Image (cartoon, grey):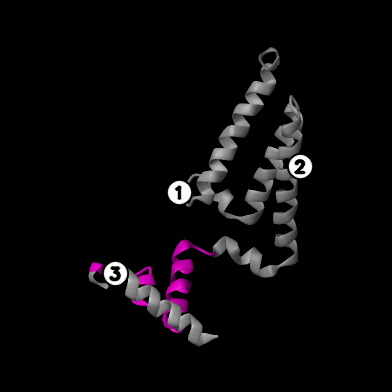
Amino acid sequence: DTWVHPAQVVLGGYLAVFCLLLLSVELNFKLRENFGFLYHPLGRAWLLFLMSGMCFCILAAWWETILGVAFLVCFLGYAFAYWKYPEYRAWQSYSDNEVWNDVQQATSRSGITSWANPYNHDPSSLPNLPSTLSQERSSLLTKF
């Protein structure tokens, strides 16, 4: 019955492409040059709103309604966070390099072990697992 309505097939195809695009951005594939709007909270929110509308337009099965509501709730969550929290608005200028710089600063302040440092690529610093686990367990127990 779905093949009788070609518009549903086309909308479903676009919806699949947009879902894969959103998944690719969430998995940090290098798409910023071509799809930079997805790295901004409102850009991602509008894509979710578009996907929600596509789900409501297809309506060939009950699960499309549920998926449309889920996309709509995600859109409202992004829009509310953008409106309510000014630090979330600054996310558009927050690059991956800044994130890793913040991680490096946090790890240097917290006294994290060398094997957990994302910038340490020295294979000799890899831990001996049984002794490392006991050291980590004892350090966690002494902190609390």
Marks 2 and 3 sit apart, C-alpha to C-alpha, by 47 Å
Residue at the spot of label 3: 126
Among numbered discs 1 and 3, the one appearing first in the sequence: 1
In the rendered structure, the answer to whether residue 144 lies left or right of residue 96 reads: right
Residue at the spot of label 2: 69
Q: Residue at x 38, y 71 (%)?
A: 116
| Pick the front one: 96 or 74 | 74
**Secondary-structure class at tag 1:** loop
Residue at the spot of label 1: 29
Region rendered in magenta: 94-123
Q: Residue at x 47, y 62 (%)?
A: 96
The label nearer to you, 2 versus 3, is: 3
The label nearer to you, 1 versus 3, is: 3
User: Is 104 a magenta residue?
Assistant: yes
Q: Looking at the image, is 68 positioned above or below residue 130?
A: above
Residue 32 image point, x, y percent: 49, 50
Marks 1 and 3 sit apart, C-alpha to C-alpha, by 28 Å
Amino acid at pointer 2: Val
**Secondary-structure class at tag 2:** helix
Q: Quadrant of the C terminus?
A: bottom right
**Secondary-structure class at tag 3:** loop
